[in-house]
Amino acid sequence: MALRETDPAEVGGYRIEDRLGSGGMGVVYLARSASGRRLALKVVHAQYADDDEFRIRFRREVAAARQVSGAFTAPVVDADADAPRPWMATLYIPGEDLGTHVRRHGPLPLPKLRELAAGLSEALRDIHRAGMVHRDLKPANVMLAEDGPRVIDFGISRAAEFAASDVLTQTGRVMGTPPFMSPEQFSCPQDVGPAADVFSLGSVLAYAATGRGPFDSPSPYETAVRVVDGDAELDGVPDELLPFIRLCLEKHPKSRPTTGELLTLLRDGRLPAPRPEPDHATAADERPRPRRRRRLLIASAVSALLLAAATTVTVVAVNAEPTPAARDLPAGWRAWQAKDTHNADGLEAGSFANCAVVGGGLVCAGDDIKAARFELATGKVTWSHSVDPTPDESGNSDGEVLGTKGDRVFVYENNEVPDKKNADSMIHDYSIQALDARTGSVVWSRRVWQGAEVSAPSTGRGGVQANVGVVPQGVLTLDQVKWSSYTLLGAYTGKPLWRRALPKADMCDLRALGGNGYLLCSDAGDEKVRVMRIDPATGALRWTVAVPSTLTLVGQAYGRLLFVDDGGEEYRTLTTIDIADHTRSTVRLARPVSGENTGIVSGGTVFFTNPSGRVQAVDPRTGRRLWDSRSSVESPGPPLAFGTHVFIASPGGRLAALDRATGTERDARPGPGGLATSGDGVPITRSGDALYVPYGVRSVYSVDARDL
């Protein structure tokens, strides 16, 4: 970044060579000492230089910053709090900052994520030991040096924050970057402590793992509301890091671990000892604020941040009614309903099985439909393909969206023909395919199995045998012909990247959850099932845990696989396997659940649904029943936990929004009409605030979740 005419030639005897950047508190220069050492020198903006209290705070923070001496921080070399424009120089760290690196190269791989988690935890430990709080840990303040990450820009932020005794109501000087701030930085900034940095650490690591922040929203206000009251979006975070990040992102500061406990967790895999349940009525030893009051404070804090960023002057926050946050909807979106009528001749009047948002559209698959694409904004069907390229009345296949990767959607084709030796059967010829989700064209196709007895590729939806699983590296498949091997098809070419012999067993299922693959193998008459985790890089089995054969895998949450016991008339326990250390645990349900219910995990909660419309929510960590709702939706499909609601839909498209905290049915909408298919409702898909509800015969409608 080129120097400007107004930039100084030197500061404090250090020659200025380049401008590295600028922010709300000052300008950062690349400087060089007389000995040739390169420094990052930050000069405070003039308006803060005129604030006597700021100078006092700054002087104290410089003294504290000099005490920070760690391998993962940039040490303070020199500073002058009494200069006309106070400045501080730290050692210059060459390399990209984390934000730039992720934007250019994508999320970090797991080994780098582990290194980043350890380095940042150690850096924060050193900062906290010096009596400091960073308060603005974000990707731009993490440098990726050759020998590990470095935390930069600490010290000044705290000095600026305390420039007035009441930073929110008097001057509005609320420091931080909304997507990476902690709840208390919005609600009670005067009480922010080291736990705020721990929360920011969790958000930074989630960003590094996925390329997005866990609370990203279209507007700063909505982001702030999600930070304070919403759930973190952690889809795509490697399972091994989920426990670490979830602990960091606990809403109450007292529930978060210390940096020392985080380092122990990374080193030994030992979770911190449970803390006493915090009194959620008092976020910072003060009287509880009504929800409206809290929202007003959030709005004030965000206003202060935005105005400070735009004008770099002190502003006064006004407790006015906040403007409603912008809705997160596809461009040009409107409520719509549509039906796939392409290639309808000769096809069964069936329903979609599942859908996925990919390549800027909604791609659905189901009875006889390999895949059909709807425009997200309007519902226009842009292309549709049959499972069987030469359909006839002799057979039909149930299509399924197996998974997605970038703009590609993985589906299957069945080019079946009559069995010449048996007129009553068909010879199936299954191929897994990658389609360009925008055009529907076949990117690659790989024949996987052929024969009269083989079953269709499936990820295990609806309780059928699972033989395919999609992981970030590609598509895991079982060899159904010989039942002797499993392989990984590359996501971009479809070519086998490796092939491994299956463990000796009479039967194996293959599942993919959270980006990891698992084999579930058993022998006839055996009372145990072996659960084995697959290393996607090599196909080797990392660990094996035996569980009772009556258990059914229903999902994962909090870094654990979750199983329910189908062996009796009631569900009485949950069995969990820790993905990181592969320990098995049993959680007893506080209240038994009828075996007629179907269990599924969404948003960290286990939901049990019943054809009658009853939905029960259970905390998988404790077995406590959170609520029991009698909804108006018959035969509900899998619940979708999103924001403050849980959404369920019937086969005919009736949609209900249940309060996520209490289970109360807040709103319900009847289905659009038409032929309702049998079975349970189809999973709801969403893109931002837009919900997409499959129903009836190859039909979908879309509504704004905020209107429910």
Image (cartoon, rainbow, N blue to C red):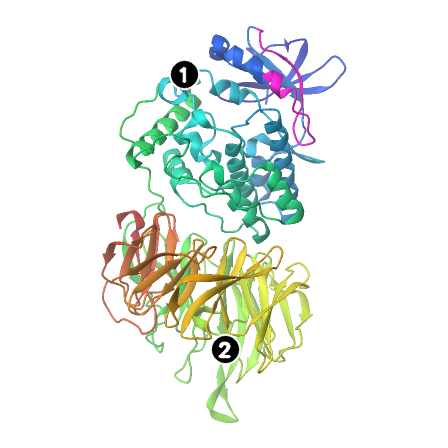
Amino acid carrying label 2: it is Asn
Picture residue at 42% right of the left edge, 52% below the top: 360
Decide whether residue 67 is among the magenta residues.
yes
**Residue 447 makes an appearance in the image:** yes
Q: Which residues are magenta?
A: 62-83
Residue 270 in percent (x, y) is at: 62, 49
Amino acid carrying label 1: it is Thr
Decide whether residue 14 is among the magenta residues.
no
Callout 1: SS: loop
Foreground: 140 or 163? 163
Residue 35: name its quadrant.
top right
Foreground: 275 or 434? 275
Residue 127 in percent (x, y) is at: 61, 28
Number of the label disc, if any, that sits on residue 349: none
Give the labeled residue for mark 1.
Answer: 314
Callout 2: SS: loop
Give the labeled residue for mark 2.
Answer: 415
Is residue 689 depicted above or below 200 in this figure? below
Q: Is residue 243 left or right of residue 146?
A: left
